Amino acid sequence: MSRSENHREALVQSPDDSGDTQGETPLPWDQLGALIAVRLAEPINYALIMPFVYQMVEGFGVAKTSKDVSFYVGILMASFSVCQMITTMFWGPLSDRIGRRPTLLIGLAGDLTTFVLFGLSRSFTWALVARSLNGFCAGNGAVVKSVIAELADNSNRSRMMALLPLVYNVGMAFGAATGGLLADPVNQYPRVFGNCEIFRTFPYLLPCLVGSLTTSLGLVIGLLRLKETLVIVPVPDTDTNETTPLLSNTRPSVLQPKSMLALLTPTFRRLLSGNWLAGLAFIIGTQAYPIFAATKPSDGGLGFGTRSIGFSLSISGIAILYLQLVVYPRLERKHGALKCYQMGLKIMTPYFFMLPFLSILASHIERTVGGSDAILALPFPESWISHAGLEYCLLWILLVILVVFQLVGDILAFTSINLLVANIAPSRATLGASNSLQQLITSFNRLVGPLAAGSIWSWSIKHELPYPFNSHFIWVLCGTLMFFSWRLSLRLPSSVDVFASGRTQQSRAGV
């Protein structure tokens, strides 16, 4: 055996899971804080463009009619996901080889650069290229999940995994609010930015700069505070004979399945299939909402402006902290991750069927005062005491209720799926690869979701067919997908509630 082979180094994870029997292990907030700062970049930058992407594409002049704008919005949003999907199976295994920390920092550096480029877009082609490059760099999600699984033990794993959707949802809320408040500042805030030529030339640069600032903060904190969670573990050399010394050399090794197919056990396939359906429904709905909110009520939308869209996307931020940090860990400890997953899917299903009916109320407001946002321009007494003002308040109350309803299901389902994927992983050395498979499903959904959202919405409002093929069709489709995902989750065995990964390569037969 060559000298270089005897000195090869590999990275495998080392924390012990024995800390679950004597109470909960305190959370390592020093590392979690750094990880949160690193993780925030992707959801902020992903959601930040949602409030203004419709107006941005409309301003490019690439669509022939207003009803075609949603199609090009779908293409732009899907470009991020297709590029993320292409590279998602690169980032996870790369982190298994070179470590989690360098992989995360590389992704952040790329994300920072490409998002500034997106803010400088003045044409659809430029925006498409910049968004695609941003997708190439967005592989940190799977790596962060691996770090969480490696930092945790059985006593605190659910609390730590619950932080991931919390960070993602807070980032989405912050990004949406930032995009809505800071887009086109010259027209939104003429007294402050009226003479700022750079923001007149690049109307969407300011929110992108703020998003890049949060990415820069994550990069700096990651460099200074984030530690590597993989350590070198020596594995005895198996090439021995009669002349091999008793204290022979050892070489580090990675204990992994022979191929990615070895990870696809029957239970893992069922879990990924259900995750695919639920994720597809969720992402189609997420991508369709800004289009639905910006569309005229007469065409089946809400008629919101940029600021109202941003606010409506961020209103769930207050409830997220309590639900994610307090409610979910208690429910998971009492019922298990599998039951929480099934409960979340069941809750989200009716949300999709009910949401489009808000357009009926928005249509009545439009006929009365010319649109939902027009009420805000009326004098105060008239805006809130009038019949239209009361209807406007009712519209927002119902919207908030539905959004919070959807948020509860989102937290239950997608926090639990992170736990279940970590539980099913055959070994700790394959956590990166296992999470990358899940991320591959997510990336595929993020590719199909925007294209489906834009195309289906454009088709449904153009043809003016009866229910359910009118503007309700996209929401009926999402609700149906979520229902079948719930049905599929009922076939998962209770054994998925147990963390199976040991410190060596041990897998459960049939799982």
Image (cartoon, rainbow, N blue to C red):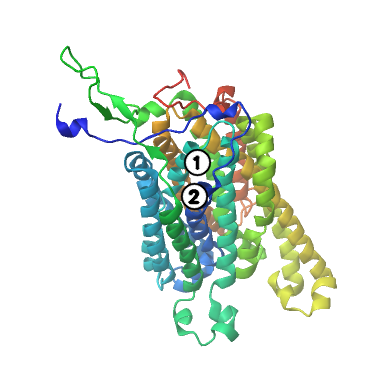
In the image, 100 versus 420, the foreground residue is 100
Residue depicted at x 56% and y 72%: 182
Left or right side of 488 for 213:
left
| Crowd rating for badge 1 (residues with CA inside 10 Å; few <14, some 14–19, many 20+) | many
Count of labels in the image? 2
Residue 416 sits in which quadrant? top right
Q: Are marks 2 and 1 in contact (CB under 8 Å)?
A: yes
**In the rendering, at what x and y percent does residue 195 appear?**
51, 88
Residue depicted at x 54% and y 55%: 287
Q: Secondary structure at mark 1?
A: helix
Left or right side of 95 for 237:
left
**Label placed on residue 204:** none
Q: Quadrant of the N terminus?
A: top left
Which residue is the site of mark 2? 35
Q: Is residue 327 visible?
A: yes
In the image, 74 versus 46, the foreground residue is 46
Which residue is the site of mark 1? 148
**In the rendering, at what x and y percent does residue 114 appear?**
38, 63
Q: Identify residue type, mark 2.
A: Leu
